[in-house]
Image: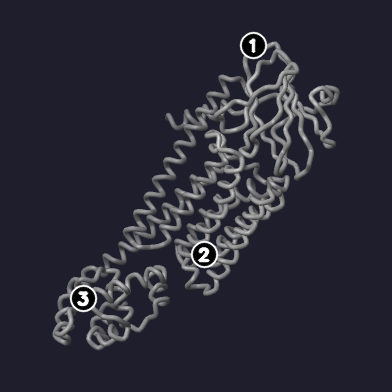
Amino acid sequence: MKFKLFFLILFLTGSVFSQSDIFYVLDSSRSLTYETVKEKNFKPFKNNILNKKSNDIYWFLIPADSTTSEYVFRITYDRYNSANAFQNSTPLNKLRNQRYLSYQFSRQHDVYIEIDPEFHTYIPIEFDTVENAILKEKNQLLLNGFYYGFSFLIIIYSLFYYIFFKDNAFLYYSLFLTTMCFGVFTMDGMLNYYNINRNLNLFIMVSNYVLLALFSSKFAISYLFLDNNYSGIKKYNHIAVLFIVVFAILFLAFESYIYLLILNILVFLLMLTYWFFSILLFNKNVYNKILAFAYVIILFSGIDYFVLKFMGMSFANIDPVTMKIGAFFEMIILSIAVSYRMKILKEENFQMREEIVNYSKQLDNLILNESQDKNYSIVELSIRERQVFNLINLKKSNKEIAMEINISVNTVKFHVKNIYEKLNIKSRKEALKYNTILQPLLEKEKI
């Protein structure tokens, strides 16, 4: 009930204003001043401004009103850090420690606000009384706390499974989720809230783009076993990430709109490519199906917000709140995929457990009788290591073993190293000498 009430309050306290509250005029010549702009014909402002990149300046007018309430004018986009605001010939100071650029004023006199878009012309505005603005900001921070808290739990959950199962997919998912959450964190204007200076703000934003591209691709490759299915995928990935790094450096050096646009396009093009791979492998297993459905939510939300809006268009009018909702559902769906994957692995291990326990002592005795001069102990192998060892004795390569038991090649190498240490052997050749001893038992196990 409290959860429903929270979202009801969030909805009711949204930014709603009539067309008579705010007006705007476009200054294409960049020549208007506070004194001269008063003579222009202002147009009613509706919801937000979304246009292609230009050098235009936008002037906003909030007419005087008889109300005694104080009002807050806020641009709900983290890329705006400064503007020029005037009331009765007096400059207005922006509010400090705010997520977004905000001004507070009475309605006794007209207020004029000059905004010069830096990278692209997207100007979403909230305008409300101080009381409603404070209430909405509290609700937003409460929503943010819930989102980041849930994200933290999923990150810890993924790291736990990585430590327990030694599967890189969980590590890369936790890193991918961390960068995605930090992207939402910056999009929420939290760097502005903590008064991070502009240059550091841009560096953090661009660095997170690079890490998002890197970890999302690493996660997709590991989760979908793409290196097993497409041998050249890692080389393609390294080239793509290198291009992303180059344009990130170019943007930081020149702060050009075009470099930032290309950077955004490359990041989401890379993510779109791996989503396409999940479609190609859609029918291979259930994990791929779940990833294809989960990835599409955050992917196309990000394309709308970070790419299309840069070009002055939008197909869904995505904002930070809808981005968080999309990311929330993505986390839930992929967490289900992780749980399902673990369930399958547990079932496979349980089916093998009884047979392994029954013949492990016999197997150990056979090996010890044949090689008394070495310290072999098959019973020291874990269930997963026994699977890998048996497949080695069937002359399977690391890649074939990875595909057979649905783990990465690196994880296979990790298990092989442990097997060598526990059995006191140094190569596959030494392991294969037990083939004649193990063959009858392996046929019984039907691996």
Residue 445 in view: yes
Residue at 52 percent of width and 41 percent of height? 185
Q: Which residue is mark 2?
A: 282
* Secondary-structure class at tag 1: loop
Q: Which residue is mark 1?
A: 68
Q: Nearer the viewer, mark 3 or mark 2?
A: 3
Chain-order first, disc 3 or disc 2: 2
Chain-order first, disc 1 or disc 2: 1
**Three-letter amino acid code at the position of disc 3:** Ile
In the depicted structure, whether residue 79 falls above or below residue 434: above
Residue at 85 percent of width and 36 percent of height? 29
The quadrant of the rendering that contains the N terminus is top left
**Three-letter amino acid code at the position of disc 2:** Phe
Structural distance between the alpha carbons of marks 3 and 2: 38 Å
* Secondary-structure class at tag 2: loop
Closer to us: 115 or 291: 115
Q: How many marks?
A: 3
Horizontally, is 311 left or right of 349 in the view? Answer: right
* Secondary-structure class at tag 3: helix
Q: Which residue is mark 3?
A: 378
In the depicted structure, whether residue 338 falls above or below residue 370: above
Closer to us: 55 or 362: 55
